[in-house]
Amino acid sequence: MTIDNTPEPVIHRDLPTPKTEALAAQAPRKRRWSERLPVVSQLRQSVGLQRGMLVAGLVITGVFVLVAILAPFIAPYSWAQQSANGVKFGTQQPPSATNILGTTVSGFDVFSRVIWGSQTALLVILAAIACSIFIGIALGLVSGYFGGWLDRTLVVIADAIYAFPSLLLAIVMSIVISRGQSNLWSGIMATALSITVVFVPQYFRVIRAEVVRVRAEPFVESAKVIGVPTGRILTRHVLRNSTRSLPVVITLNASEALLTLAGLGFLGFGIEATSAAEWGYDLNRAIADVTSGIWWTSIFPGLAIVLVVLGITLVGESLNDLSDPRLRTRRRAGGAA
């Protein structure tokens, strides 16, 4: 009997082959949760001037949020404080060591009013956007998914509200809600709810359009066939795939909410001066000062409004451009050239 001493070939199953290496290189890398955040993912996609605009907007907005949160530690006085150590500030005093940005016609410290005004603006923006998102998404989800007479009725109501001038509608709602008297929290909620009425049709139209598109997708039809409850379809399948454009709408509406708040305060329908600091009210009180050469009572509240609106608008416009595949492709082609 002949014994074959030829060694058997050793097969290394764990060693990568050129083919497996090529497939591994082509396989998409699973993104971390931090990379899937709306602003972070858009920032990674941005290039050139677009990235500069987005970074500048994020920096300005971040500073605004930090100042609003740290207002009790940054502001040297309260928003309605008129004296320190038993000595009154005086009215319309120029910038000094005691009042680094001067005082208003009512004897308030301008620097403290600007700092505390950022907190009021942030609270109103957050409350208005939160209420608008909740109501707008709920109505848009139900209207777009079920359709029929309910959809037609809600569309007509939303279009009718959207046709009114936003500031005029906010003034009417502010009068109805606050009745001309507002302290800190009631004034914030009254202003936020009056802005909410203006913003709800925008969220309703955006979500409804996305829901109508997603409703016809095969995975929604499959969920219906296998008997998935309607509530689960709405929340897990339809809603999750209908909120892609919400970050863009939120950032654009945040700047509009600040302008509406300033407009209400400037016209005398905002929050009372002794209840909270508000930039629009301070601008209204500084109208007569401008003709007298007293510039510090108006320039700093006005500059705060301009900077915050600029920062939020830069973020919103950058996200809007980056979410459009045509603009994104065009910028990448231009950068490659």
Image (spheres, helix red, strand yellow):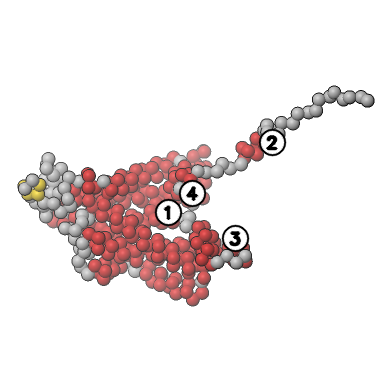
Instruction: Give the residue pinned by disc 2.
Output: 19
Residue 5, located in which quarter of the rendered image? top right
Tell which circle, 1 or 2, labels the residue nearer the N-terminal end: 2
Q: How far apart are marks 3 and 2 (CA)?
A: 34 Å
Tell which circle, 4 or 3, labels the residue nearer the N-terminal end: 3
The kind of residue tagged 1 is Pro
Front tag of 1 and 2: 2
Could you say which disc has been placed on residue 219 in the image? Answer: 3
Residue 250 visible from this viewpoint: yes
Q: How far apart are marks 2 and 4 (CA)?
A: 36 Å
Which residue is depicted at the point 11% across and 51% down? 82
Instruction: Give the residue pinned by disc 1.
Output: 247
Q: In this view, does 253 lie to the left or right of 243?
A: left
Q: Is residue 124 above or below residue 76?
A: below
Tell which circle, 3 or 2, labels the residue nearer the N-terminal end: 2
Q: Residue 316: percent from the left, percent from the top?
A: 39, 51
Element under disc 1? helix
Q: Distance between the residues labelled 1 and 3?
A: 25 Å
Instruction: Give the residue pinned by disc 4.
Output: 327
Which residue is depicted at the point 41% across and 64% down? 136
Mark 3: give few (<14), some (14-19) or many (20+) Cα within 10 Å.
Answer: some
Element under disc 2? helix
The kind of residue tagged 4 is Leu
Element under disc 4? helix
In this view, the residue in front, 304 or 133, is 133
In this view, the residue in front, 126 or 278, is 126
Mark 2: give few (<14), some (14-19) or many (20+) Cα within 10 Å.
Answer: few
The kind of residue tagged 3 is Phe
Residue 263 visible from this viewpoint: no
Tell which circle, 1 or 3, labels the residue nearer the N-terminal end: 3
